[in-house]
Image (tube, rainbow, N blue to C red):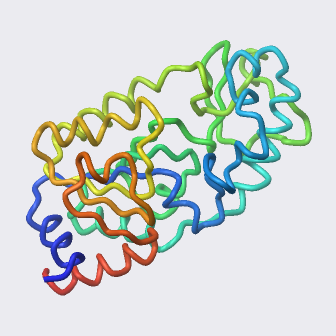
Amino acid sequence: MNIYQEAAKKIIDSHYCVAFTGAGISVESGIPPFRGRDGLWNKYDPMTFEIDYFLQDTARSWEIIREIFYDLFGHVLPNTAHYALAEMEQRGLLKSVITQNIDNLHRDAGNIEVYEFHGSLKQITCLTCGQKVNVAQVDMAHLPPTCLTCGGLMKPDVVFFGEAIPEYAAFKSIDASQRADCMILIGTTGTVAPANTLPFQAKAGGTTIIEINPDPSEYTDQVTDIFIQENATRAMEHLMEAIDELV
């Protein structure tokens, strides 16, 4: 039995399998990671994405947000790995996806039960009244956008540095991690807190951890049971083939 067959068997035999994804699953869709050699933080100051900076220099902050997230991210599409997770959910092999990503690609691929730990770029929210609107309704030529309901300042519905994790996403992610008997980690290095604690919470309950990463992560030697050292798309293609052979 090879490593993909071993992982596939764990998934098929599980009662509550969840996926936990990070930037690495979206790199192959053309989205650069935030950290590392080609990361966005080498080009842009992370301070730009602190909530205090956003409130103090909103116009400048929105210009950078538009340049990175809407001009760049707005044209990307899900890749094979995203579609594989959607198919797994449709086939009843996967209960949910917990993601640190804000690109909405899991939903675009067809996953229904997605817990966006850091929010989503697809919506912007009013800081005064809490009204949320789809970003497609926003005129990016006129920044910063203001709320049509109350006139308040609007920001992307994502977690900036200095902000709390959304209550619903945090609750659902922790609950899924604790209920899981199998967790598939894809493209996450384990360096971003507090999201990085979720696989440890899962492992504490006896969960089998399957990790897919091109390089070892903070999890590899601590919680991982099956380490597939490969990029996300190739690994998920092989994993789906192995699942098909066993089902």
Furthest-bottom residue in this view: 245
Q: Residue at x 41, y 23 (%)?
A: 167
Closest to the observer, 54 or 131: 54
Q: Residue at x 27, y 51 (%)?
A: 221
Closest to the observer, 191 or 244: 191
Left or right: 74 as drawn, with respect to 141: left
Left or right: 79 as drawn, with respect to 41: left
Q: Residue at x 67, y 12 (%)?
A: 128
Q: Quadrant of residue 46?
A: top right
Q: Quadrant of residue 190?
A: top left
Q: Position of residue 95 (x, y in %)?
A: 24, 53
42 above or below 82?
above
Closest to the observer, 148 or 183: 183
Left or right: 50 as drawn, with respect to 232: right
Q: Position of residue 106 (x, y in %)?
A: 47, 57
Q: Quadrant of the N terminus?
A: bottom left
Furthest-front residue in this view: 221
Q: Quadrant of the C terminus?
A: bottom left
Left or right: 21 as drawn, with respect to 74: left
Q: Residue at x 28, y 42 (%)?
A: 199
107 above or below 62?
below
231 above or below 108?
below
Q: Position of residue 187 (x, y in %)?
A: 45, 57
Closest to the observer, 146 or 121: 121
